[in-house]
Structures are given as structure tokens and as C-alpha cells.
Amino acid sequence: MTTSGAAAVFLIAVPVAFNVAFGLLASRFEYPDVLRRPTDEVLARFRQGGTGLVLPWWGFALSAVLLAPLAVLLSAALDGADGALLAVATTIGVLAAAVQFLGLIRWPFLVPYLARVAAEPDAGPARREAVDVVFQSFNRYLGVAVGEHLGYSLTGAWSVLAGAAMIQADPVPSWLGVVGIAVGGVLMLCSMEFVGRAEQSGWKPAERLTPIAYVAWSLWLIGTGIALVV
């Protein structure tokens, strides 16, 4: 398989895997709306989901990891683009994969433990309060700060850089590069949802725009993959 062919496989498969996992979590767990509910309710719903909920979270985290080889292969396939631009884009893409993985991996490993501890028969108010503090702390740190803020901003930055490289490169139409720059800019804007005055309750325009931006980003990746092999 050629580099372009391998890049196309990842460009098509990664957004499909990402959206399948997200769809399963949305239908079985009401994600991401469930995250705005009290800890006890979130963990109770998590226990009810059992293995059928843990595995989609595991798959969701792994779909984030796959952004790393996608970024590497896409840069290798963009013949004619500036080498320094491709090197920076690749680095940013790998970092985006790493921080999104770190933000999500707590769900298949840490959260099941917290859900079990909270449901133990001898769990008193002090233990439940400790579980609440741990859950919300990891949610704010790994979920909001690392996974969402850094994840969205780095994914957006990679999309902008990759789009700029596509405009210079031969294998794909330049208009796909323009789309990548636009979608990447929106993702970077969405990364500001919980920054500054919006830290507590979130910036509503970013909350509404994020799912639309990720659908557009997924379609852009798939379109780029198709363009590489047509």
C-alpha cells in the first residue's frame, strides 16, 4: 500500500470510528449532557451501563490515539508542501492525539472504580464526598482542561496547518485546504468554552458550536481521504 493509500484509510476510518463511539455514548449514556448532572447521578448511570458502556469509552479513547498516525501519514502524502510546515503540523497532530487520549482514558479505568466505591454498602457521606471531589477534579483537569481545551485547540491548530499544507500540495484540491483552515479555526474558538469568566458554567455559543464543528471536521477528513485515492 502506498503512503497516500494508507493516509486515506486513516482519514476515512478515524472519523467513522470516532463518531460511532460518540453515537453509542450519546444513546446509552446521554453523553455529553450527562456530565452536567450531579456526580451521584453520573456514576449511577455508569454502573447501570456495565461493560456495554465501558467498552465504547475505551474505543472512544483509542480513536483519539489514531489521530497520531493519521497526522504522520497525511504529512507524508502531501507532496509539494513546505517541509517545515509539514513538520510542525505533524508535531501538533501527534500532541492533539496525546492530550485527547489523556482526557478520555479516565472513563474506562478510573470512573468504573469510583462508581463501585460510591455504591459499596458501607459507603458513608465522607466516602461519597471524597468520590465526588475526585470525580469532579479529574473531570475538570483531564476532561475540560486537557481533553477539551488542549484537545480542541491542538486539533484545530493541526487542521489549520494541514489545510495550509494542502493548498501548497499536489495530491488534493486546494479548496479542501481552505475548508481545513476554516474548520480548524472554529475548533480553536470552541476550545475557549471554559476559559475566563465562563470557567464555571461554560460559554454557550461554544457549547452549541462544538458538535457542529466536529461533524464538519469529520466530513473534511473523509473528503480528504477520498481525494487522495481518486
Image (cartoon, rainbow, N blue to C red):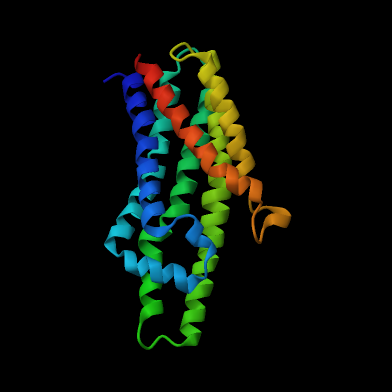
As drawn, 85 above or below 126:
above
Marker count (numbered): 0
Question: Looking at the figure, which quarter contains the N terminus?
Answer: top left
Q: Quadrant of residue 73?
A: top left
The one of 47 and 89 positioned closer to us in this rendering: 47
The one of 210 and 100 positioned closer to us in this rendering: 210
* Residue drawn at x 41%, y 55% as measured from the top left: 105
Residue 90: percent from left, percent from top? 48, 31
* Residue drawn at x 45%, y 42% as measured from the top left: 97
Residue 65: percent from left, percent from top? 39, 43
User: Could one spot residue 192 in this view of the protein?
Assistant: no
Residue 26: percent from left, percent from top? 41, 52
Residue 8: percent from left, percent from top? 35, 24
Question: Looking at the figure, which quarter contains the C terminus?
Answer: top left
Q: Quadrant of residue 51?
A: bottom left
Left or right: where 156 falls relative to 61:
right
The one of 142 and 26 positioned closer to us in this rendering: 26
User: Could one spot residue 106 in this view of the protein?
Assistant: yes
Left or right: where 185 falls relative to 101:
right
Q: Quadrant of residue 52?
A: bottom left
* Residue drawn at x 61%, y 39% as measured from the top left: 188
As drawn, 118 above or below 179:
below
* Residue drawn at x 52%, y 66% as measured from the top left: 37
As drawn, 91 above or below 150:
above
